[in-house]
Amino acid sequence: MIAGRGRRIRPPRRGLGTSDAVDFDSMWDVLASSLREIHTKNASKLSFEELYRNAYKLVLKKRGETLYIRVKEFEAEWLANEVQPRIIEELSQTLLLATSGTQMIATANEKRVAGEKLLRALKQAWEDHNLCMNMTTDVLMYMDRVYCKDFRKPSIFSASMGQFRDHVLRTPLSDNPDDQISIAHILNAVMLDQVQMDREGDIVDKSLLKSCAYMLEGLYETEDEDESTKLYLTSFEPEFLRASEEFYRLEGAKLLLEADAGTFCKDARKRVNEEEDRCRSTLSPLTLTKVKSVVETELIKKNLPEVIALEASGVKYMLDNERLLELELIYELSARVDPKKEELRKAVQARILEMGNDVNKATAAATHTLPKPSDQDGDKAEGEEKASEKPVSQQTTAAIKWVDDVLQLKERYDHVLTEAFKSDQGLQTAFSRSFTDFINAFERSSEYLSLFFDENMKKGIKGKTENEVDLLLDKGITLLRYIQDKDMFERYYKKHLSRRLLMKRSISMDAERQMISKMKMEVGNTFTQRIEAMFKDMAVSADLTSNYKRHVAELGDPDPKRAEIEVNVLTSTMWPLEAMAPSYNDGEDRPRCIFPPQIERIKQGFEKFYLDKHSGRQLTWQANMGTADLRAYFPEMKGAKKTREINVSTYAMVILLLFNDLPPGGFMTTEEIQARTNIPLNELTRNLQSLGVAQKTRVLRKEPMSKDVKIDDKFYFNETFYSQFQKFKIGVVTSGNKVEDSQERSETEKKNNDTRGGVIEAAIVRIMKQRKELSHQKLIAEVIQQLTARFMPDVNMVKKRVESLIEREYLERIEDREPAAYRYLA
């Protein structure tokens, strides 16, 4: 037969007969007897098919509710009369007294044994109950599927678990209403005690604890069996967390009192790992996050500031002694309790600032205690021709040492950052801020960094590989990144670079260009435009010199002794001409240097050649920045060859050529030399010291012999001069790049502030031209924001430039506007 839509073919029921009557009591007796056999572990002879059919009949005949109630009553009676008494028998007096709060004396082993005895009894009872109820559930499966489902009753298994909770764990042990201690209370106390012993290093049965925790996880507060109502979470866990808080509070206080910072960190990490392992292997993973939070709060977070600040072992000690493993530990602990790691950041920043300021103070002290040149003359000055150079050399050495010390400090903390602090971005920013603070607190940082580059470009990179040079430049650029007044650095760098280029003191032009490229990447094109223009001038000058030599050759000059000239034509707006100008005494006239006739003729020839090509330009000769190669003849020099090739400054060349016109034994005084050359007295003195005082380069003889040059001192050509070198160089005393004194520094700052004034005005006009109208505060803020990359503008200077622009009618104040505002005037 084919069923129609929506209808189902059911097989005929068999074996039930046609009578609706059922003998419930007789069937229940059979079931009750069988359940008792199951609980007494004597179920091997039972027919589960028959038992199932009996339960099936009762449910089918609408007696499911009665059956459900009878089974529950049976289980309740069994648990109360059979199971709980067996567990109570395992309770020792020790546990009862301990749970009731009575003071007692018991060894750790006694407590452990008594506790394990109870836990073992509970574990056995729980496992037996689970086994029996699984078998009972099989018998009453139809009741669960039909009656329980239709009437929304918990399954018989769930109901029996609730009865285990109520009749075994929570039934008071005493009828006294004032004494409501139950096995559940004792269980919690025993488990907590076992955990405490485990924390203290005693051996406990972890599998037993795990079984009891599993039992509590399988029991619920309500019949709904919601996950949040597990007995483990509602009964045991809160007490466990409270006990953990107390334990780790005391543990932290004890460690602070007895241990150093490194030991504290190791113990704290060990405790966190122990709790993670305990939750996985002894209790429940449900507690893992909560107990870790307790450890992190009570043991780490509340004590970490004191640990970091410990005088003899804290972060300062770790940093000073490069205890990287301990620093890594303290970083990990800080990261656990504070994503920003504020306490660690403050401690490291404070130490960097402290060490950086120590470097600054040491450098300042070194420069203030330099020996002053003595005024002794006569024989004592002989052999001490470099005495006047010594303070300058020491100043430069102190400057280079400052940069090296800062770089070493940077390298040291970079190592700490990568190895101990996992290159943490927040800490890296903090490190950079600290270096920025102490570097800019040192007023000569820009000058010293430029001197560092200067020394390395002149000799520091000699013999180094390309990678080593690149690394050295990168280190310097790193410090440039921290310097706020980059315009001041640019001023010094251009000054030092100009001397290197013009005096041909740079070891590698490739390295110079590489340096400019790195600067451009770090601080932008604007910063390097003028420096690049300096290199362009040098390249153009090389071509110009080559063209001039061809021009002279084409003219066919018949003079075989004609000197060759190499000229560098510098664009006045791109080169630091004020720094390159010769030094004059206060009030001294500033005439141009008088060149010897043979040099003057060549000079005028070049001027004509150049101005014919570039009409309208003006050439100003900077004799103090040039050098010359001379061939000198010393009649009484030892040896067969009496000529030497000498490299001297242009001023020294002018001085030496004067002696060609003197008869043998003739002399000139300092005053006469200055009158015939117009060399500034400062420059003349330094060059005469190089030529007539320094023992190894004494091509002139000075009378009287002393280190200082006076206006009436006499100078003779030293015909007996001897040098083992065929070619040698006579350097100018105290020439080259040196640390500025206070007066020079003040002048540099004044010039730089004048330049800044123009830059600030340009920024103000640029902003106002775009905005048309702007409030005073917003204008100041935007100007500072635009110029911070180049230098940190002074607010008072910005205000003065605004006033100046108002006076010159670039801006005007907007009347009756609060707050004060300005309008741009086209």
Image (cartoon, rainbow, N blue to C red):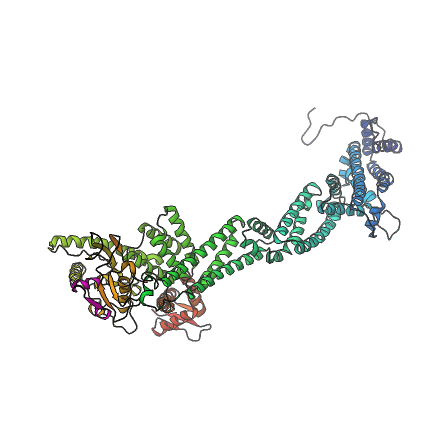
Q: Is residue 390 left or right of residue 9?
A: left
Name the image quarter holding the N terminus: top right
Residue 455: percent from left, percent from top: 36, 56
Residue 42: percent from left, percent from top: 84, 29
Residue 351: percent from left, percent from top: 53, 58
Quadrant of the rendered image containing residue 569:
bottom left
Q: Is residue 751 left or right of residue 589?
A: right
Residue at 24% of width from left, 54% of height from top? Answer: 540
Give the magenta range.
655-673
Residue 115 drawn in magenta: no
Q: Is residue 228 left or right of residue 57?
A: left
Name the image quarter holding the C terminus: bottom left
Quadrant of the rendered image containing residue 742:
bottom left
Q: Is residue 417 left or right of residue 243?
A: left
Between 493 and 594, which is closer to the camera in this rendering?
Answer: 594
Q: Which residue ends up furthest to the top in the rendered image?
A: 1
* Residue 83 visible at all: yes
Residue 743: percent from left, percent from top: 37, 69
Q: Which residue ends up furthest to the bottom in the rendered image?
A: 816
